[in-house]
Amino acid sequence: MTLNNNIEFKGTKDGLVIHLDESCEYEKLKQQLIERLEHAKNFFVGAKIAGIEGRELDNNEESEIIDLINNRFGMVMVEKPVVYSKQEEEVFSGLEEGITKFIKSTVRSGRKIKFDGNVVVMGDINPGAEVVAYGNIVVMGALRGIAHAGANGNNEAIVSAFKLQPTQLRIGSLIARAPDNSSYNPKYPEIAFVRDEMIQIEPYLTKK
């Protein structure tokens, strides 16, 4: 992963928000943040910092980052920056018209795809592969891996596939598995959704 992907600065009306990649270890993030700020030191002097988001920080890590950007690089805090956790992210609501990522191939074992919107896979999701989406997941083939729709808290999301046989299926905060019956082999597309606090799976048949 490149430095630009691990550390991002987002402009808001209240100042800059620093985004730290959630999958990167803390010491590496801290060093890359120092390098990024040193590279454009004159630009960042006096900049207002409104928050830190992405990777969750413990109290010591948070204090170290705040001290670093405040005292070493002369940035101006908007009081104390807000440190956003995953749970505080805005729930993705664009299930009907939101941004959509198209995967024009089969998702093979060992690959993980995560997207902050809807995902359409124009192939299969193989066992050992994982697709995580804040919105819906639609598979134009067989879903035999892991799928997690509504991953940041939207239980209104759906998962559909021509063959819905996941090793694990999640929607929002709920989790389900495919039937253990190895002979289960649906001949029609299926759709998974949440009803009565449970994940339900039904045939996806168009109405005439």
Image (spheres, rainbow, N blue to C red):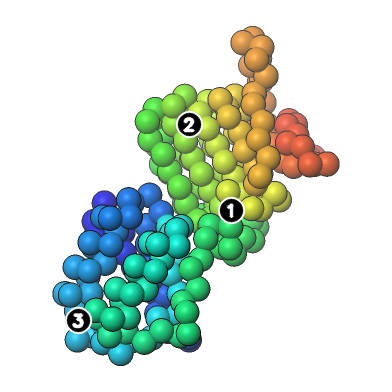
Packing grade of label 1 (10 A; few <14, some 14-19, many >=20) is many
Residue bearing the label numbered 1:
152
Compare marks 2 and 1 and give the one earlier in the sequence. Answer: 2
Residue bearing the label numbered 2:
125
Residue 44, image x and y in percent?
A: 27, 83
User: Do the CB atoms of the residues marked 3 and 1 lie less than 8 Å apart?
Assistant: no
Compare marks 2 and 3 and give the one earlier in the sequence. Answer: 3
Examine the rendering and report whether any part of residue 129 can be seen.
Answer: yes
- 81 or 141, nearer to the observer: 81
Residue 189, image x and y in percent?
A: 65, 30
Disc 2 versus disc 1: nearer the observer: 1
The secondary element bearing badge 2 is classed as loop
The secondary element bearing badge 1 is classed as loop
Query: Mark on residue 41?
Result: 3
Q: Is residue 175 left or right of residue 148?
A: right
Query: Mark on residue 114?
Result: none
Residue 81, image x and y in percent?
A: 46, 77
Residue drawn at 48 percent across, 68 percent down = 83
Q: What residue type is labelled 3?
A: Lys
Label 3 to label 1: alpha-carbon separation? 35 Å
The secondary element bearing badge 3 is classed as helix
Point out the residue furthest to the left here.
39
In this rendering, is residue 75 above or below 136? below
Disc 2 versus disc 3: nearer the observer: 3
Label 2 to label 1: alpha-carbon separation? 21 Å
Residue drawn at 38 percent across, 35 percent down = 111
Q: Which amino acid does label 1 sit on?
A: Asn
Point out the residue furthest to the bottom here.
46
Q: In this view, does 156 lie to the left or right of 44?
A: right
Query: The C terminus lies in which quarter of the figure?
Result: top right
Packing grade of label 3 (10 A; few <14, some 14-19, many >=20) is few
